[in-house]
Amino acid sequence: MTDPVLEIRGLRVDYGLGDAAVHAVRDVDLTLHRGEVLGLAGESGSGKSTLAYGLTRLLPPPGVVSGGQVIYHPADGPPVDVLTLSPAQLRKFRWAETSIVFQGAMNSLNPVHKVSTQLLDVIKAHEPQSTAAGRLARARDLLRLVGIAADRLDSYPHQLSGGMRQRVMIAMALALEPQVVIMDEPTTALDVVMQRQILGQLAELRERLDFAVLFITHDLSLLVEFSDRIAIMYGGRIVEEAPAAQLYGRALHPYTEGLLHSFPALRGPRRELTGIPGSPPDLRAMPEGCAFHPRCPKAFDPCDKKVPALGAAEPGRDVACWLHPVAAGGPR
Amino acid sequence: MRFLLQRTAFYLFTAWAAITLNFFIPRLVPGDPVQSLISRNQGRISADAIESLRVLFGLDANENVWEQYLHYWGQLLHGDLGLSFTFFPAPVSTVIGDSLPWTVGLVGITTIISFLVGTALGVGAGWRRGSWVDGLLPATTFLSSIPYFWLGLVAIAVFAGPGSFFPSSGGYEAGLVPAFDGYFIPSAIQHSILPAATILVSSMSGWILSMRNMMVTVSSEDYITVAHAKGLSERRVALSYAARNALLPNVSGFALSLGFIVGGTLLVEIVFSYPGLGYQLFQAVGAKDYPLMQGIFLIITISVLVANLLADVAYLLLDPRTRKS
């Protein structure tokens, strides 16, 4: 494994303040390595998008980051904690180092400006010394990179299809050649054919430009194919983290197992689709102990009393479950 | 372009309909201008004079309605709106021409200032919710809910009066001759401050409130989050992304309010005895001055239509989604 590029340590995100606060992300530790695709999966409301907004400091009020660190390792220079950057430093950091492709493919572009305006302004904001002609050439290259004709620069967002808009967003995300691209359900609003095309293109671009991706989705089947490692989130915590193939082959956490059984395999023997009974926990009234225990088919004695810590149960695999006591050495 | 032509054709049709109504309505009303002129002169008009008055007002008994209608159009196209009674024998077009600049000058300028200042404050209030601008809102809303005539009367009672800087009525010092010179212009400005201030106070809050609310709505759009994530400056996100989109409804509102400049100033001008079109209309109604009323209604209709066309054009320029490729 190569060096880390983004380390999330003990990140906590609340909605609201004081006693009424809802803890949407609880003590999350997650490391993104240089050039890898880390998948983050979970049900709606598990806190995966909140995590992404929290680590980029884009949380809309009443969201607050109430603790933790987000350490970013630039290609050159000392690591910085994103959460302590000043507003001016943060503006410089954004997009140049970490860009984001958002969930709403349809609404991510400003409807009253041309595609070119929106591509060029980000380049201009971060590279004020660049020339207008240079920026335009760059914008053309970017569109070509994602398979869109360069004359589309003069189009307005409403003249593009949903797939094209999302590809424009991906082109925009790569405009400043960031080290990290966060993708928050980038293909959810698109049909499966378009989804496949865009993901294929993305994989190819990643090979070429070598950026790390934090890929957030509720579609675990997508991650199994597309990512190097997968982290599973439940009730605001990471409950399992493992290399994609290992996780798909054998899930340690019962929740992961449930997720894996909720979509059919394309190859191999037929199996029953079971899904997970019950519904995601109410973040305002989380159950005692492991958040998953009320729905867990394998719940036993300690599950409703103490929260299991995330730790290495096997080499290279972390899990937070009483079924898999953390191996000697304790929590990592 | 085609869209604009379509709109223009539509507005021309509407103008035709309005002018036609303007022709027929006075003819459907019992009594006619000649009758009321006769009674004003208490019958001391000769039969010949009555006949020529009828011809003058386009009510020639020898013409049927259709001929009168064509005649009316012919006169209209020559800019001839007939003769006013109140200012007999001044033509209506002269009366309107004299009073229109006052109305457009006073209400037009205040409408533009009110829109610009109100919208700017609204952008500020919507972008930084909870700042001091938000504190202005209840006050401005309260002021705008006061009936205008009362606000005007209070302003006169408090600020105008003997020895005060603010005159209580009129558009300029009595005795001055309207001209662009060093005596008349300062006097006209001095006379317009009080009415202008009351108009601003009562109309500003609408702009602030609607702009603020649109800013709040737009601020939660995805493209605003994207703009923040792109690391653009706060100013650029606020103006080019948020305000630029939030402005759209306000701009069409503004274009429409331009249309009401001419017709909507009756109260201002009555309260301040301001020599504009509204005051003239008020006098015309009191004197049953049909030709003048008809002429003013025509101007009001046309200005509303032109404003609508302006709103269409503005929207076309500002919102690419309304342009058909």
Image (cartoon, grey):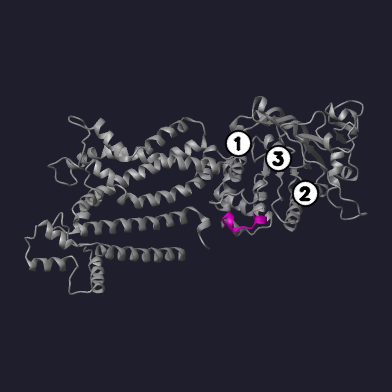
**Dot 3 surroundings within 10 Å: few (below 14), some, or many (20 or more)?**
many
Is there any visible trace of residue A308 in the rendered image? no
Q: Mark 1 vs mark 2: which is more N-terminal?
A: 1
**Dot 2 surroundings within 10 Å: few (below 14), some, or many (20 or more)?**
few
The residue located at (25%, 59%) in the rendering is B294
Point out the frontmost of discs 2 and 3.
Answer: 3
The residue located at (53%, 56%) in the rendering is B321
| Mark 3: amino acid | Ser
Q: Mark 1 points at which residue?
A: A91
| Mark 2: amino acid | Glu
Q: Position of residue A251 (x, y in %)?
A: 88, 41
**Chain of the residue under label 3:** A
Q: Is mark 3 on a helix, strand or loop?
A: helix
Q: Mark 2 vs mark 3: which is more N-terminal?
A: 3
Q: Give the range drawn in magenta.
A: A155-164
**Chain of the residue under label 1:** A
**Quadrant of residue A128 in the image?**
top right
Residue A157 part of the magenta segment: yes
Q: Is residue B230 left or right of residue A305?
A: left
Is there any visible trace of residue B230 in the rendered image? yes
Q: What element carries label 1?
A: helix
The residue located at (47%, 57%) in the rendering is B316
Q: Name the residue under label 3.
A: A49
The residue located at (59%, 59%) in the rendering is A151
| Mark 1: amino acid | Arg
Give the spatial CA distance, label 3 vs label 1. Answer: 21 Å
Q: Do the residues at discs 2 and 3 belong to one chain?
A: yes
**Dot 1 surroundings within 10 Å: few (below 14), some, or many (20 or more)?**
many
Q: Where is residue B162 in the image (x, y as percent from the top left)?
A: 17, 30
Q: Mark 2 points at which residue?
A: A207
